[in-house]
Structure formats: structure tokens, C-alpha cells
Image (tube, grey):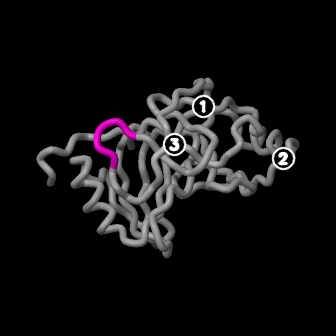
Amino acid sequence: MNPEATTAELTTISLPIPWEGLALPEPIQFDRTAVTYGDVGWAWSGNMPNLGVAVCDPSRGEAVAGWDLDHVVVLVPDLDAAVAEFTARTALSPVLRMRVKGRPAAHYRVGPLLEIIESPVRAATLYGIVLVTTEPLEVLALRWRSMGRDVSGPTTALEPGRRILTLRDTEAGLAVMTPTVAVADH
């Protein structure tokens, strides 16, 4: 581990997703991370991992009640190399390693959860984001469809007790999930 490394926090994500066309502000603020419309990129406080994702200008946005950022998805050609680089630059270790749809993945807490998935890509890419809303997904899907958007679902999510829908007509991945369900003690 690099002794000069400091922890890092993801402060801004730029994706070609038309927020205003989804009746959401642009940029939109989720806790300490802003999401803005533009070319794919990100901005960090502290040491930024060198995964090959472009850098964007830091931004601040408008928060929207009932909405949050669940996780950010990055696809990489070699997960072990990405984990080694990430840990060396940020001094952070994965909070979870697992398989996502059969592919190895590592998860980091960098403000939002950062999900790095090994995928058959030539270079690392900031693929997209998953938001959370307290609004019923059926209502959201109907509203976005009435705006001419191509929405799949809602369907059962991989995480037990949650549901998800996907907006298919954007240049970056965008999914929206129901909040995490509390697990009852038995």
C-alpha cells in the first residue's frame, strides 16, 4: 500500500443522461455526490483511482426528497488489476467481493457504493448508476413512459426484497430501485 495514499470520496459523476428530461434537476445532488449531464467522467476528493475513467469538473446540484444514489457501476477488463490500483491509490479495501451476474466484482464505499465489475471491455468505463426512490416504481415507470421514455420493469432485483426498473434509451446505464428492505431478526 502507498503510505502517501489517502482515502478518497467520489464527489461528482458526469453521464449523458438527460436529467431535466426525466423531470429531475440537473445537476442533482445525492448526499456528498453530484450527478450531472455531460460526457462520461468523475471527480474525487483525495486521491482519485487511476482506472482510466475521464475526469470531469466538480459540481454541486439540487437535492430531491425521496431520491438517493444507491451505487455507481464501473466495468473493467481485469478486476484484480483494478482492485490493486484502487487500493494503492486510495488506501481503501473492498467492502465486499462477489459475483454479479456471473462476473467477479468488488465493492468500495466512496460516498456512494462503487461497484467494479470485470467485463469483456477493452478499457475501464464508467457504465452507469443505480438510484433509489421512495416513489412507487410503477408510478415512476408510467410517468417516464408518458414522457416517451423506454422503461423496462419494474421487476424483482438481485437483492432480496427490492425491485428495479431500467431506463433503456440513454447513452449510459440508469436503473432505479426501491429502498433497501430491513431484515427482521428471527
Q: Main secondary structure of the magenta part?
A: loop
Decide which of tag 3 and tag 1 comes sooner along the chain: 3
The answer to whether residue 180 is visible is: no
* Quadrant (top left/top right/bottom left/bottom right) for the C terminus: top left
Q: Amino acid at mark 2?
A: Arg
Label 3 Cα crowd, 10 Å radius (few <14 / some 14-19 / many 20+): many
Residue drawn at x 52%, y 33% as measured from the top left: 34
Residue drawn at x 15%, y 54% as measured from the top left: 1
Circle 3 residue: 13
Q: Secondary structure at mark 2?
A: helix
Residue 164 image position (x, y, % from top left) = 64, 50
Residue 113: quarter of image = top left
Residue 26: quarter of image = top right
Decide which of tag 3 and tag 2 comes sooner along the chain: 3
Q: Secondary structure at mark 3?
A: strand
Circle 1 residue: 28
| Cα separation between marks 3 and 1 | 10 Å
Q: Which mark is residue 183?
A: none
Q: Amino acid at mark 1?
A: Ile
Q: Residue furthest left?
A: 3
| Cα separation between marks 2 and 1 | 21 Å
Circle 2 residue: 145
Q: Amino acid at mark 3?
A: Ile
Residue 50 image position (x, y, % from top left) = 34, 55
Residue 48 image position (x, y, % from top left) = 33, 46
Instruction: Decide if residue 9 is on the left or right side of residue 13.
Output: left
**Residues in magenta?**
44-48
Residue 132 image position (x, y, % from top left) = 58, 39
Label 2 Cα crowd, 10 Å radius (few <14 / some 14-19 / many 20+): some
